Amino acid sequence: MTVEEKPKFTKPQLFLRIALLVLLLAGTVLLILNRDKIQQFKAYGYPGIFLVSLFSNATILVPLPGVMITSAMAMVFDPFWVAIASGAGAALGELSGYLAGFSGQPMLEKSDKVKKLTAWMQRNQSWTIFLLALVPNPLFDVAGFIAGASRMPVWKFLFFCLLGKIAKMLAFAYLGAGIFSVFD
Protein backbone atom coordinates (compact mmCIF):
# COMPACT_ATOMS: atom_id res chain seq x y z
CA MET A 1 0.00 0.00 0.00
CA THR A 2 1.34 3.43 -0.84
CA VAL A 3 0.73 6.63 1.09
CA GLU A 4 -1.41 7.87 -1.81
CA GLU A 5 -4.10 5.19 -1.32
CA LYS A 6 -6.94 5.93 1.09
CA PRO A 7 -7.02 3.19 3.73
CA LYS A 8 -10.33 1.87 5.00
CA PHE A 9 -10.44 1.32 8.76
CA THR A 10 -13.00 -0.29 10.99
CA LYS A 11 -14.34 1.90 13.81
CA PRO A 12 -12.16 0.18 16.46
CA GLN A 13 -9.06 0.56 14.26
CA LEU A 14 -9.83 4.22 13.64
CA PHE A 15 -10.41 4.80 17.36
CA LEU A 16 -7.12 3.07 18.24
CA ARG A 17 -5.20 5.13 15.67
CA ILE A 18 -6.74 8.39 16.86
CA ALA A 19 -6.07 7.48 20.51
CA LEU A 20 -2.43 6.66 19.67
CA LEU A 21 -1.99 9.96 17.83
CA VAL A 22 -3.53 11.94 20.72
CA LEU A 23 -1.29 10.07 23.18
CA LEU A 24 1.82 10.88 21.11
CA LEU A 25 0.88 14.55 20.87
CA ALA A 26 0.17 14.73 24.62
CA GLY A 27 3.50 13.03 25.31
CA THR A 28 5.28 15.57 23.14
CA VAL A 29 3.69 18.46 25.04
CA LEU A 30 4.54 16.80 28.36
CA LEU A 31 8.18 16.31 27.35
CA ILE A 32 8.51 19.90 26.18
CA LEU A 33 7.01 21.26 29.39
CA ASN A 34 9.33 19.08 31.50
CA ARG A 35 12.53 19.32 29.46
CA ASP A 36 14.44 20.80 32.43
CA LYS A 37 13.61 17.71 34.52
CA ILE A 38 14.77 15.40 31.74
CA GLN A 39 18.27 16.91 32.02
CA GLN A 40 18.57 15.37 35.50
CA PHE A 41 18.81 11.86 34.00
CA LYS A 42 22.35 12.54 32.80
CA ALA A 43 23.50 12.24 36.42
CA TYR A 44 22.85 8.49 36.10
CA GLY A 45 25.68 7.83 33.63
CA TYR A 46 25.12 5.85 30.45
CA PRO A 47 21.54 4.79 31.33
CA GLY A 48 20.79 8.46 31.99
CA ILE A 49 22.31 9.45 28.66
CA PHE A 50 20.16 6.78 26.98
CA LEU A 51 17.01 8.15 28.66
CA VAL A 52 17.79 11.80 27.87
CA SER A 53 18.37 10.87 24.24
CA LEU A 54 15.22 8.74 24.13
CA PHE A 55 13.08 11.55 25.55
CA SER A 56 14.65 14.26 23.42
CA ASN A 57 13.91 12.25 20.27
CA ALA A 58 10.42 11.16 21.33
CA THR A 59 8.97 14.57 20.57
CA ILE A 60 7.13 15.03 17.30
CA LEU A 61 8.30 17.90 15.07
CA VAL A 62 9.74 19.83 18.06
CA PRO A 63 13.38 18.88 18.55
CA LEU A 64 15.04 18.94 21.95
CA PRO A 65 18.85 19.36 22.10
CA GLY A 66 19.92 15.70 22.32
CA VAL A 67 23.14 16.11 20.32
CA MET A 68 24.30 18.92 22.59
CA ILE A 69 23.85 16.67 25.61
CA THR A 70 25.77 13.91 23.82
CA SER A 71 28.69 16.29 23.20
CA ALA A 72 28.65 17.48 26.81
CA MET A 73 28.49 13.96 28.27
CA ALA A 74 31.41 12.85 26.11
CA MET A 75 33.53 15.36 27.99
CA VAL A 76 32.93 13.32 31.15
CA PHE A 77 32.33 9.74 29.96
CA ASP A 78 33.91 7.54 27.26
CA PRO A 79 32.77 9.08 23.92
CA PHE A 80 32.26 5.68 22.26
CA TRP A 81 29.83 4.44 24.93
CA VAL A 82 28.15 7.84 25.12
CA ALA A 83 27.46 7.55 21.37
CA ILE A 84 26.12 3.99 21.73
CA ALA A 85 23.81 4.92 24.62
CA SER A 86 22.72 8.14 22.97
CA GLY A 87 22.24 6.61 19.52
CA ALA A 88 20.20 3.70 20.90
CA GLY A 89 18.02 6.07 22.92
CA ALA A 90 17.57 8.36 19.91
CA ALA A 91 16.56 5.47 17.63
CA LEU A 92 13.96 4.21 20.10
CA GLY A 93 12.70 7.75 20.62
CA GLU A 94 12.15 8.11 16.89
CA LEU A 95 9.48 5.41 17.09
CA SER A 96 7.14 8.26 18.07
CA GLY A 97 7.29 9.63 14.51
CA TYR A 98 6.88 6.15 13.05
CA LEU A 99 3.86 5.46 15.25
CA ALA A 100 2.37 8.87 14.46
CA GLY A 101 2.65 8.02 10.75
CA PHE A 102 1.14 4.61 11.34
CA SER A 103 -1.76 6.00 13.37
CA GLY A 104 -2.27 9.25 11.49
CA GLN A 105 -1.79 7.90 7.97
CA PRO A 106 -4.88 9.59 6.49
CA MET A 107 -3.76 12.93 7.95
CA LEU A 108 -0.29 12.94 6.39
CA GLU A 109 0.18 16.27 4.63
CA LYS A 110 0.51 16.04 0.86
CA SER A 111 2.84 19.01 0.26
CA ASP A 112 5.36 18.88 -2.59
CA LYS A 113 8.20 18.21 -0.14
CA VAL A 114 6.35 15.33 1.48
CA LYS A 115 5.50 13.89 -1.94
CA LYS A 116 9.18 14.10 -3.01
CA LEU A 117 10.38 12.50 0.23
CA THR A 118 7.69 9.80 -0.10
CA ALA A 119 8.78 9.03 -3.66
CA TRP A 120 12.45 8.89 -2.60
CA MET A 121 11.59 6.62 0.32
CA GLN A 122 9.62 4.28 -1.93
CA ARG A 123 12.76 3.79 -4.03
CA ASN A 124 15.37 3.85 -1.23
CA GLN A 125 13.49 3.32 2.03
CA SER A 126 16.31 1.91 4.16
CA TRP A 127 19.01 4.28 2.96
CA THR A 128 16.73 7.29 3.30
CA ILE A 129 16.14 6.45 6.96
CA PHE A 130 19.87 5.90 7.49
CA LEU A 131 20.93 9.16 5.81
CA LEU A 132 18.27 11.28 7.50
CA ALA A 133 19.19 9.75 10.89
CA LEU A 134 22.86 10.46 10.21
CA VAL A 135 22.47 14.16 9.48
CA PRO A 136 20.88 16.54 12.02
CA ASN A 137 17.77 17.82 10.26
CA PRO A 138 14.08 18.46 10.87
CA LEU A 139 13.00 16.03 8.11
CA PHE A 140 13.53 12.90 10.15
CA ASP A 141 10.13 13.09 11.84
CA VAL A 142 8.48 13.40 8.43
CA ALA A 143 10.48 10.39 7.22
CA GLY A 144 9.32 8.50 10.31
CA PHE A 145 5.71 9.45 9.53
CA ILE A 146 6.12 8.22 5.97
CA ALA A 147 7.82 5.00 7.11
CA GLY A 148 4.95 4.28 9.51
CA ALA A 149 2.28 5.24 7.00
CA SER A 150 3.84 3.07 4.27
CA ARG A 151 4.11 0.13 6.67
CA MET A 152 7.90 -0.14 6.57
CA PRO A 153 8.67 -3.04 8.95
CA VAL A 154 9.40 -1.56 12.38
CA TRP A 155 12.56 -3.69 12.77
CA LYS A 156 13.91 -2.30 9.49
CA PHE A 157 13.08 1.28 10.49
CA LEU A 158 14.79 0.81 13.87
CA PHE A 159 17.84 -0.91 12.40
CA PHE A 160 18.66 1.80 9.84
CA CYS A 161 17.68 4.54 12.27
CA LEU A 162 20.01 3.02 14.89
CA LEU A 163 22.92 2.85 12.44
CA GLY A 164 22.47 6.48 11.42
CA LYS A 165 21.90 7.79 14.95
CA ILE A 166 24.94 5.98 16.39
CA ALA A 167 27.16 7.27 13.57
CA LYS A 168 25.86 10.82 14.14
CA MET A 169 26.30 10.54 17.91
CA LEU A 170 29.85 9.22 17.45
CA ALA A 171 30.71 12.40 15.56
CA PHE A 172 29.13 14.63 18.23
CA ALA A 173 30.60 12.65 21.13
CA TYR A 174 34.15 12.75 19.78
CA LEU A 175 33.72 16.41 18.87
CA GLY A 176 32.63 17.15 22.43
CA ALA A 177 35.50 15.11 23.90
CA GLY A 178 37.95 16.84 21.54
CA ILE A 179 36.80 20.28 22.57
CA PHE A 180 37.22 19.35 26.22
CA SER A 181 40.76 18.05 25.65
CA VAL A 182 41.79 21.36 24.05
CA PHE A 183 41.04 23.13 27.31
CA ASP A 184 42.81 20.53 29.47
Image: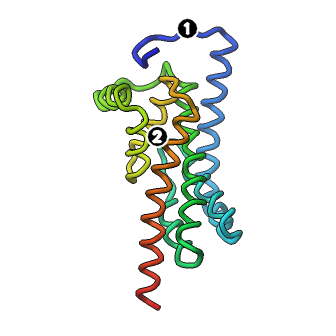
Q: Does label 1 or label 2 sit earlier along the sequence?
A: 1
On the image, which quarter does residue 168 sit in? bottom left
Instruction: Tell me whether circle 1 and circle 2 mark residues in contact (CB < 8 Å).
Output: no
Left or right? Give the position of 51 relative to 120: right
User: Percent x, y for residue 62?
Assistant: 48, 47
Please state which of residues 91 and 31 is positioned toward the viewer in this rendering.
91
Instruction: Residue 173: give its label.
Output: none
* Label 2: element kind: helix
User: Percent x, y for residue 25?
Assistant: 59, 37
Left or right? Give the position of 9 relative to 127: right
Please state which of residues 126 and 68 is positioned toward the viewer in this rendering.
126
* Alpha carbon separation for disc pair 1 and 2: 24 Å
On the image, which quarter does residue 41 sit in? bottom right
User: Percent x, y for residue 147?
Assistant: 48, 30
Mark 2, Cα crowd under 10 Å, few <14 / some 14-19 / many 20+, is many
Q: Is residue 163 above or below residue 171?
A: above
Q: Which residue is under mark 2? A: 141
* Residue shown at 42% from the left, 64% from the top: 171
* Residue shown at 57% from the left, 32% from the top: 154
* Residue shown at 53% from the left, 42% from the top: 159
* Residue shown at 45% from the left, 85% from the top: 181
Left or right? Give the position of 168 relative to 22: left
Instruction: Residue 8: give its label.
Output: 1
User: Percent x, y for residue 52?
Assistant: 62, 59
Amino acid at the residue labelled 2 = Asp
Q: Is residue 152 above or below residue 42?
A: above
* Label 1: element kind: loop
Amino acid at the residue labelled 1 = Lys
| Residue that protrudes farthest toward the bottom in the picture | 184
